[in-house]
Image: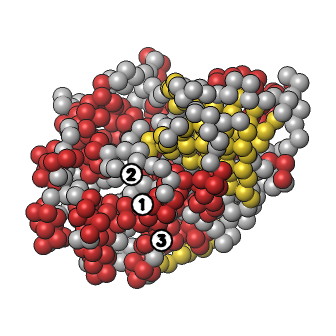
């Protein structure tokens, strides 16, 4: 797991090595073990390395193979690299290292762009062809690893984080109206290519971008999720689907044990993480380290699930660590978590995940985590409401969107009004081929868009802030493709995730399955009080905010007058959304100014 950066020049001017070094060094927490720069012709590549596979210098990056005429920087983990290595060796390729980086480079040489179809893993990469001068950028199927790009004068830059691009300088930091609409509609989700900044774009999941030496570029979607089912799929019994699912889950978890360091697990106490722990032990992991974070209780709401995590830890004999975080520490260290965000993220989980990652990184470099199960297997409350819906776009937006367009028009200043981009996005994605059932349409949107730019991005940002690699078996593409074939009725059974829960029952205690879903609010972020409210007030009333002119004063004043009264349908604070965005902008745009 690493951080990558690069610059491609189109105008004959030399690569700005100083800017490349800044972009690379900003990502040091993602890769604390080694640093590398490579500049040749019109291309510069930067890399920060976290040693997980092949701990030797043989897998250092950037890598350049003079025999193949190819250079590479790569962020991620290719779980089937041993199998691909054997296949490539049979073709006559020789290897000097033992990790996945060299396999990826030679796989591209052997199979061209189609090599991505053979990869099982999470990845973002840049491959430079010396002979043609072309650069190929790529991102994994489900967007587990990020890749941001930015136009600069006479060239293009890319990096694993948006702040890295800002550190390079020369970025247009104007607010993107479409990104802003998405941010305030989808609790900070900004689907690609948009970010909050007009000058920064992100490559979509399952996409390749080929960049020519003159700056021309071509994008190609190389993977999409299809919910089409055969008649056999439709009529297969629930029990048969359960058994097939469990078999694929075992394979997904087992694949993510490939590493040259021990692999631990984040154990929340819920079904998803508990199942992963059970399958890791079943796969033969000894002395498995597991971690659970908990917070203070909030009224009648429990702030932790220690008791359920303990049941699983005791059942499987793990080396378990409880991490209790007092509310005051959450609040005190919130600015650090905001600094660790590649993009503004409003979820309460960010600060908790940030502190959890810090504690876990003291003992583990790699963990498996349970993100994605709710989106893939239908665990959220809006899926049953869509069953048989005659107006699925309206029904989805009513349950999921933070504010409709009428309210949005009262939030932002006229310069940012634009169009109802959030509705357009949902309508476009729902109408795309490959999913005709409203539930399937919502599952596909959530799995390929909302999941990528909320929970998955959150996990990547917060874990990598401490050089911790998080692997997500529920987003194994073979598992996701199998899940798409399972009829929606099996997912919605039992109040949601029915098929997954019954698969889990074969592995973990029923006490962990047959209980309410946990939710841990940080009250100071949900209702805004105390020092957090003061920070938000300061940010929104600051000179920088006034000059930026994003929000209408009367709307801000209305929220300020009674923060607790303005909560989104998904239980988020509307004021926190505004305040967090301004706080993030003030935190990160300082880097761009310093680089200018």
Give the image location of residue 161, x and y in percent.
53, 52
Q: Nearer the viewer, residue 580 or 247?
A: 580
Q: Is residue 126 left or right of residue 525?
A: right
Give the image location of residue 67, x and y in percent.
85, 29
Image quadrant where residue 211 sits: top right
Q: Where does label 3 land, which residue?
A: 336
Q: Secondary structure at mark 2?
A: loop
Q: Is residue 536 left or right of residue 20?
A: left
Q: Nearer the viewer, residue 70 or 494?
A: 70
Q: Residue at x 18, y 31 (%)?
A: 391
The answer to whether residue 485 is visible is no
Give the image location of residue 141, x and y in percent.
54, 35
Q: Secondary structure at mark 1?
A: helix
Are the residues flagged by discs 1 and 2 in contact, CB closer than 8 Å?
yes
Please tell me which of labels 1 and 2 falls first in the chain.
2
Tell me the CA gap for discs 1 and 2. Answer: 8 Å
Image quadrant where residue 33 sits: bottom right
Neighbor class of circle 2 (other Cα within 10 Å; few <14, some 14-19, many 20+) is some
Number of callouts: 3
Q: Is residue 342 left or right of residue 408?
A: right
Q: Where does label 2 land, which residue?
A: 173
Q: Is residue 416 left or right of residue 442?
A: left
Q: Residue at x 44, y 16 (%)?
A: 231
Position above or below: 546 against 523: above
Q: Which mark is residue 589?
A: 1
Please tell me which of labels 3 and 1 falls first in the chain.
3
Please tell me which of labels 3 and 2 falls first in the chain.
2
Give the image location of residue 359, x and y in percent.
59, 73
The answer to whether residue 176 is visible is yes
Position above or below: 334 against 389: below
């Amino acid at each position: 797991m690493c951080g990558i950066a690069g610059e491609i020049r189109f105008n004959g001017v030399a690569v700005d090595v100083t800017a490349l070094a800044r972009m690379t060094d900003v990502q040091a927490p993602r890769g604390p073990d080694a640093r590398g720069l490579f500049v040749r012709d019109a291309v510069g590549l930067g890399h920060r390395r976290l040693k997980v596979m092949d701990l030797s210098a043989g897998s250092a990056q950037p890598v350049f193979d003079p025999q193949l005429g190819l250079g590479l920087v790569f962020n991620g983990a290719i779980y089937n690299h041993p199998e691909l290595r054997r296949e490539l060796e049979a073709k006559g390729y020789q290897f000097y290292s033992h990790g996945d980086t060299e396999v990826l480079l030679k796989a591209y040489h052997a199979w061209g762009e189609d090599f991505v179809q053979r990869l099982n893993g999470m990845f973002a990469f840049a491959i430079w062809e010396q002979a043609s001068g072309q650069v190929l950028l790529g991102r994994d199927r489900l967007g587990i690893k990020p890749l941001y790009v930015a136009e600069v004068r006479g060239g293009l830059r890319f990096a694993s984080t948006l702040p890295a691009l800002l550190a390079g300088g020369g970025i247009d930091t104007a607010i993107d109206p479409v990104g802003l609409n998405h941010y305030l509609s989808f609790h900070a989700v900004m689907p690609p290519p948009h970010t909050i900044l007009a000058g920064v774009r992100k490559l979509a999941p399952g996409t390749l971008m080929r960049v020519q030496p003159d700056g021309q570029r071509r994008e190609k979607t190389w993977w999409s999720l299809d919910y089409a089912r055969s008649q056999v799929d439709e009529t297969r019994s629930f029990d048969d689907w359960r058994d097939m699912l469990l078999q694929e889950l075992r394979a997904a978890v087992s694949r993510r044990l490939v590493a040259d360091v021990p692999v631990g697990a984040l154990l929340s106490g819920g079904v998803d993480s508990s199942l992963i722990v059970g399958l890791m032990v079943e796969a033969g992991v000894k002395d498995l380290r597991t971690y659970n974070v908990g917070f203070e209780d909030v009224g009648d709401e429990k702030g932790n699930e220690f008791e359920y995590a303990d049941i699983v830890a005791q059942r499987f004999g793990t080396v378990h660590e409880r991490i209790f975080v007092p509310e005051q520490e959450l609040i005190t260290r919130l600015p650090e978590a905001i600094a660790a965000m590649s993009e503004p993220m409003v979820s309460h989980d960010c600060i908790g995940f940030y502190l959890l990652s810090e504690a876990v990184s003291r003992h583990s470099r790699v963990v498996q985590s349970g993100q994605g199960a709710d989106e893939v297997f239908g665990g959220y409350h809006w899926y049953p409401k869509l069953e048989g819906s005659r107006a699925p776009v309206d029904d989805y937006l009513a349950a999921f969107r933070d504010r409709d367009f009428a309210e949005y028009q009262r939030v932002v200043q006229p310069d940012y009004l634009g169009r109802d981009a959030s509705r357009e996005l949902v309508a476009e994605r729902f109408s795309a081929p490959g999913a005709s059932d409203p539930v399937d349409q919502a599952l596909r949107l959530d799995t390929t868009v909302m999941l990528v730019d909320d929970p998955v991005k959150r996990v990547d940002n917060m874990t990598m802030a401490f050089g911790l690699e998080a692997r997500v078996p529920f987003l194994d593409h073979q598992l996701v493709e199998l899940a798409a074939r399972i009829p929606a009725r099996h997912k919605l059974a039992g109040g949601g995730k029915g098929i997954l829960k019954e698969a889990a029952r074969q592995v973990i205690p029923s006490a962990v399955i047959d209980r309410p879903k946990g939710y841990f609010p940080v009250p100071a972020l949900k209702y805004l009080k105390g020092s957090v409210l003061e920070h938000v007030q300061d940010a929104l009333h600051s000179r920088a905010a006034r000059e930026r002119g994003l929000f209408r004063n009367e709307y801000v004043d209305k929220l300020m007058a009674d923060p607790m009264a303005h909560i989104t349908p998904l239980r988020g604070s509307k004021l926190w959304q505004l305040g967090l965005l301004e706080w993030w902008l003030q935190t990160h745009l300082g880097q761009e100014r310093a680089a200018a």
